[in-house]
Image (cartoon, coloured by chain):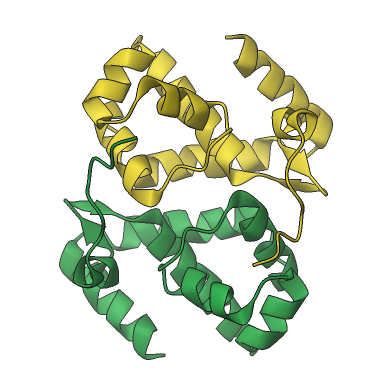
Chain colours: A yellow, B green
Amino acid sequence: LRDPLGTPGAGEATAGWQGGAVLLRLVIGNCLRRARHDQGRTLQDVAEAAGVSIGHLSEVERGRKEPSSEVLAAICRALGLQLSDLLRDVQRELEAAPAPGRLLLWSGFDLAA
Amino acid sequence: LRDPLGTPGAGEATAGWQGGAVLLRLVIGNCLRRARHDQGRTLQDVAEAAGVSIGHLSEVERGRKEPSSEVLAAICRALGLQLSDLLRDVQRELEAAPAPGRLLLWSGFDLAA
């Protein structure tokens, strides 16, 4: 398998855009982190409930690692979210952040949180 | 990293459900395949346009492989879809297939197509 878009650089990963395309793992990560923050829960709490390591959950939230569908289901369950709820948030984020500059600001805000 | 839900068996992967959770890669794969069929395009055509192998695209469509966010972006581009369009389809599928039995039928139909 060739990677048609190359390996993301740190800057591109932070901005969420690569070759004009937003990367799904970054939007999913942001939505997961926001859901956790909205519930006032720690990484440790949610990671334990999902049965994943704190480090892995943190990397997923920051869009550094692609979560498998199984891990994503476990994180959703730990957060009390249906996958369809998460995907609705993700889809709204994608529609709300059509321009790279806007997503950059949004990611910057989230990374600082 | 522990895999909290275990490795999917073939039957569970076909049904799209595991431990009561639908697996995102199966829904994404179905939506990608349907978009390709709607355009009357072959695996070879879309795989070449996306810069991935035919085998990999086929596995992604069948939910056998997790596509990276980069590969997913390339396949969307090859299909002329925005990621937000794909996610809207995915979210609708998730809402339309709330019960394992229904998703089983739906996956069975798609696998036969």
| Closer to the camera in the image, A18 or B88 | A18
Residue B1 placement, left or right of A26: left
Q: Point out residue B96 in the picture as x, y percentages from the top left corner.
A: 33, 62
Q: Quadrant of the N terminus of chain B?
A: top left
Q: Point out residue A45 in the picture as x, y percentages from the top left corner.
A: 28, 15
Residue A112's quadrant in the figure?
A: top right
The residue under the point 30% across, 21% down is A46
| Closer to the camera in the image, B79 or A61 | A61
The residue under the point 60% across, 35% down is A26
The residue under the point 31% across, 76% down is B107
> Is B105 situated above or below A69?
below
Residue B10's quadrant in the figure?
A: bottom left
The residue under the point 71% across, 85% down is B45
Q: Point out residue A17 in the picture as x, y percentages from the top left corner.
A: 76, 40
Residue B85's quadrant in the figure?
A: bottom right
Q: Point out residue A64 in the picture as x, y percentages from the top left corner.
A: 58, 33
Q: Quadrant of the C terminus of chain B?
A: bottom left
How many numbered circles does the render carry?
A: 0
Residue B58 placement, left or right of A107: left
> Is A55 situated above or below B72?
above
Residue B43 placement, left or right of A86: right
